[in-house]
Amino acid sequence: MNVKFTPFIMLDGHANQAIPFYEQALGAQVVFKQTFGEAPEDGNAPAMTEEMKKRIAHSILVAGGSELFVSDSESGQPLERGDQVNICLTVKDVSEAERIYEALRSEGKVLLPLQPLYFSPAYGMVTDRFGVTFQIFTEKD
């Protein structure tokens, strides 16, 4: 199995302040940053407020040989205690993502069904039966 584990910090509208803090505190470098407003439009999604467009959809910080993901939650979806830091599992193929997703959701809670999205052929979020939240991310070919 080829899987990569990355800590993922989820914030409620404070990622724009947290990113420069982690750059300074951890000596990290931002290698990717995208707001919700910069993401491709989804014709089925409701219109975003200007505040929502400014929130960070995803960022990648690198310090040493490690990555740290930082983003904001979607507006109106408050984070519960324990949800601020979760683990992003990155795999190379959809079948491996499906296997991991099914195993983690057993007796757990599906937050986002495993599905293709513009940035991944199979992406989903699950809180396992122990209360640990995982994001399953499949790389694009």
Image (cartoon, grey):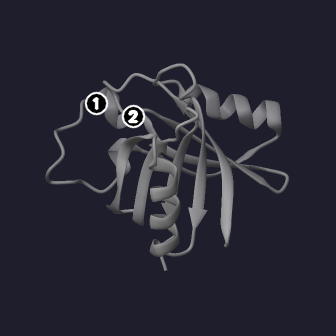
Res. 42 mark: none
Name the residue located 58 percent from the left edge and 34 percent from the top edge.
Answer: 130
Instruction: Return the residue found at the far front.
Output: 107
Which of the 4 image quarters holds residue 68? top right
Q: Position of residue 7 (x, y in %)?
A: 67, 44
**Badge 1 local density, few (<14 within 10 Å), some, or many (20+)?**
few
Instruction: Return the residue found at the far right.
Output: 64
Name the residue located 30 percent from the left edge and 57 percent from the top edge.
Answer: 40
Q: Which residue is mark 2?
A: 54
Q: For the residue marked with disc 2, what is the amino acid?
A: Lys
In screen coordinates, is 89 left or right of 28? left
**Where 127 sits versus 138, above or below?**
above
Q: Secondary structure at mark 1?
A: helix
Q: Position of residue 80 (x, y in %)?
A: 48, 21
Q: For the residue marked with disc 1, what is the amino acid?
A: Glu
Q: Secondary structure at mark 2?
A: helix
Q: Which residue is mark 1?
A: 50
CA gap, disc 1 and disc 2: 7 Å
Q: Nearer the viewer, residue 11 or 1?
A: 1
Q: Are marks 1 and 2 in contact (CB under 8 Å)?
A: yes
Q: Nearer the viewer, residue 116 or 40?
A: 116
Q: Position of residue 50 (x, y in %)?
A: 28, 30
Name the residue located 33 percent from the left edge and 27 percent from the top edge.
Answer: 75
